Amino acid sequence: IGTPYAERYHKEGDELYGQPLYLDCCGLFRQVLRDMREDFGFDVGPWNQCYLYATLPTKLSFKDVKPGDLLFVQGRYTRGRERRQKGDIVHVEMYLGEDLGSGPESTLASRDHWGCVSIQDSFKYASPWYEITALHWRSLDDWLEGRCDPVAMPGCFRSHDPYGEKVLDQPFRSHTSFFRDPEAW
């Protein structure tokens, strides 16, 4: 919380200019996954929120969402971007709910280009950048069970192997994820 969205939205002299880290919506979750790759047992690719969406195939309705599950926003850009995103997935947030957030609809998000990662009171919002056409809730369970395969869009992300030899050779990958071994809990 408090990490700015992107440096390009700030000018020299602004409080948020020149910070050591910036996290847009998908950057926030990629950073968390990379920081926890030893625990999760996989490494994520460099792609945006659509890649994250593709790796979480379990659909949820809002009544079944638990804290930690992700909300993917589908939409069409109306400002600032000409090219469409894969699957028109334009944004991602994490559900917090009442126990962890500020109310029953609260999320953790990097939503404001000139602001910072913060707790949002509601996942319902209007964007100045895109028209929201659909909301997709996805369970975090696949990641918690050590799976990161783009099964929801298999043809889009073929060049990354989250479990590949290159990944497994890295020192932080030397043991199995505790999510895969209930006895480690």
Image (cartoon, rainbow, N blue to C red):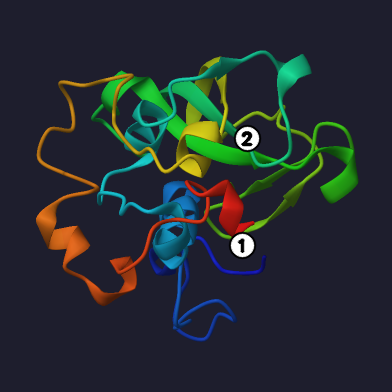
Whether residue 101 can be seen here: no
Q: Which picture quadrant has residue 165?
A: bottom left
Q: CA distance from mark 2 to mark 1?
A: 21 Å
At which x and y percent is residue 120? 75, 45
Q: Which residue is mark 2?
A: 69
Residue shown at the point (55%, 67%) measured from the top left: 4
Task: Please tell me which residue lies in front, 79 or 48.
Answer: 48
Mark 1 — residue?
Answer: 116
Label 1 sits on a secondary structure element that is loop
The amino acid sitting under disc 1 is: Cys
Amino acid type, mark 2: Asp
Question: Which quarter of the figure is the N terminus placed in?
Answer: bottom right
Q: Residue furthest front?
A: 183
Dot 2 or dot 1, earlier in sequence: 2
Visible residue check, residue 126: yes
User: Which labelled disc corresponds to residue 175?
Assistant: none
Tell me the mark number nearer the camera, choosing from 2 and 1. 2
In-image side of 50 versus 156 (left or right): right
**Which type of secondary structure does the marked residue at label 2 adopt?**
loop
Q: Quadrant of residue 57?
A: top left
Q: Nearer the viewer, residue 15 or 174?
A: 174
Along the horizontal axis of the image, is 73 left or right of 108?
left
Relative to 47, is 14 above or below? below
Residue 106 at x, y percent in the picture? 79, 39
